[in-house]
């Protein structure tokens, strides 16, 4: 029975969009963080915000290309919980942890 409970919690991460249960995918209603964007959806970066206590994350994300106005998409996610995720920005592809992707605010392109 415990195995079924674990599978029920993981199953949404295996579906198109890759979000975990209770995590809405990016919609036309407005900006969201990149970790909530649907797999394959074209987005545009609005801003990058460092989490409290980790000010270097914002600078690091900007250094690798996550700048306002850049086009970005999530190309795939790990089967086990969607972490890490593969993100394409410009001509570059990166693996980001969900916590890093959560720092990036995007809107549908």
Image (spheres, rainbow, N blue to C red):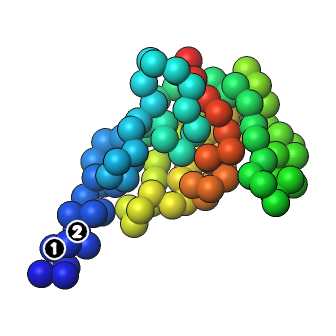
Residue 106 lies in quadrant = top right
Given the current orientation, which residue lies at the most extreme left position? 1
Element assignment for label 1: helix
Check disc 2 and report the residue beneath it.
7
Taking 6 as reference, is 79 above or below it?
above
> Where does residue 39 sit, x and y in percent of width and height?
43, 39
Left or right of 51, for residue 43: left
The residue under the point 75% across, 37% down is 48
Is 93 in front, or is 1?
A: 1
* Residue 40 seen in the figure: no
Check disc 1 and report the residue beneath it.
4
Of the 4 image quadrants, the one containing the N terminus is bottom left
Of the 4 image quadrants, the one containing the C terminus is top right
> Where does residue 89 sit, x and y in percent of width and height?
67, 35
Is 99 in front, or is 87?
A: 99
Between the residue at mark 2 and the residue at mark 1, the CA separation in whole angstroms equals 5 Å
> Where does residue 63 sit, x and y in percent of width and height?
86, 43
């Amino acid at each position: 029975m415990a195995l079924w409970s674990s599978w029920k919690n993981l199953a949404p991460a295996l579906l198109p969009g890759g979000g975990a249960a209770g995590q809405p995918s990016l919609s036309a209603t407005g900006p969201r963080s990149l970790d909530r964007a649907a797999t394959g959806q074209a987005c545009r970066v609005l801003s990058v915000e460092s989490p409290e206590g980790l000010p270097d994350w914002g600078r690091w994300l900007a250094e690798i290309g996550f700048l306002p106005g850049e086009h970005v998409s999530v190309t795939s996610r790990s089967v086990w919980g969607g972490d890490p995720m593969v993100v394409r920005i410009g001509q570059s592809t990166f693996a980001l942890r969900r916590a890093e992707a959560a720092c990036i605010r995007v809107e549908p392109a």
